[in-house]
Image (cartoon, rainbow, N blue to C red):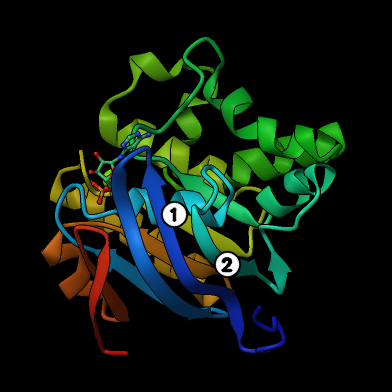
Amino acid sequence: MIDGQNKSSIIRMFHVHKNYGAKKALANITLDISKNEFLFISGPSGAGKTTLLKLLYLGEKVSEGQVLIEGINLSRISNHRIPFLRRKFGIIFQDYKLIPTKTVFDNVAIVLEATGKKRRFIEKKVKSILRAVGMEETLHSLPPSLSGGEQQRIAFARAVVGDPKIILADEPTGNLDEVSADIILELLKRFHARGATVIIATHDKDFIRKTGGRVIHLNQGYMQKTING
Ligand SMILES: Nc1ncnc2c1ncn2[C@@H]1O[C@H](COP(=O)(O)OP(=O)(O)O)[C@@H](O)[C@H]1O
Ligand SMILES: [Mg+2]
């Protein structure tokens, strides 16, 4: 048992283990993430970075240990509260997960429609976020007609349009040239400046070097060291 009343922590992980069958993906992770932190999860491919992010939004369940999000113990959350938990997160998936048959506008609007926002509000908000990521010209396009960098920016727009408290980005620069990577980094910083907690899983050392902030290093599922912590 742990108490969830650490006021400055938005996320607490306590002796967390995650196994996929016989495969150990994460071992004994204890980690506090403060409100409005800008945190990197680094480490080579297979280290457990994506798994760690998934445990936060209940994309996967822990095998052992506890995860608390704003004091809510995810091992005890009832099913009907899971959608509310997920709304705290804006998630930029490594493979974007855009719906190929829906327009760019609809891909982003989906988030606000799910929370029952009014049509006029949705139009204004979606257009404004698409403008912010430099994609306002693509409103009516379908994702497959866009480049990887452009799709990444749409995925970013969808992640942040609902003003989430926590932004999770999984290898956000993975498929990008340096210019697009810089655009994404500037956008992440902008939302961080507005109060969001930002957690980025990446093996891109240049990207980490450019930003600063705390770096958690994973290797074969173990947390090895913390830099700038
Ligand atoms: N759904 C899954 N089933 C089985 N093994 C998995 C699954 N997802 C990840 N793994 C394994 O868990 C380990 C950590 O994976 P992952 O979290 O994706 O690492 P990273 O994001 O750092 O590359 C890897 O060995 C990976 O093969
Ligand atoms: Mg990964």
C-alpha gap between disc 1 and disc 2: 14 Å
**Residue at the image point whose x is 55% and y is 48% from the top:** 61
Corner quadrant of residue 208: bottom left
Front residue of 176/77: it is 77
Neighbor class of circle 2 (other Cα within 10 Å; few <14, some 14-19, many 20+) is many
Left or right of residue 221, residue 135 in this image: right
Query: Where is the C terminus found, in terms of image quarters?
Result: bottom left
The secondary structure type at the circle numbered 2 is strand
Q: Which type of secondary structure does the marked residue at label 1 adopt?
A: helix
Earlier sequence position, callout 1 versus callout 2:
1
Q: Amino acid at mark 1?
A: Leu
Question: Quick check: can you spot residue 37?
Answer: no
Q: Give the amino acid at mark 2.
A: Gln
| Camera-nearest residue between 199 and 220 | 220
Disc 2 within 8 angstroms of ligand 1 (CB): no
- The residue wearing badge 2 is 66
Q: Position of residue 18 (x, y in %)?
A: 41, 53
Quadrant for residue 23, please give it: top left
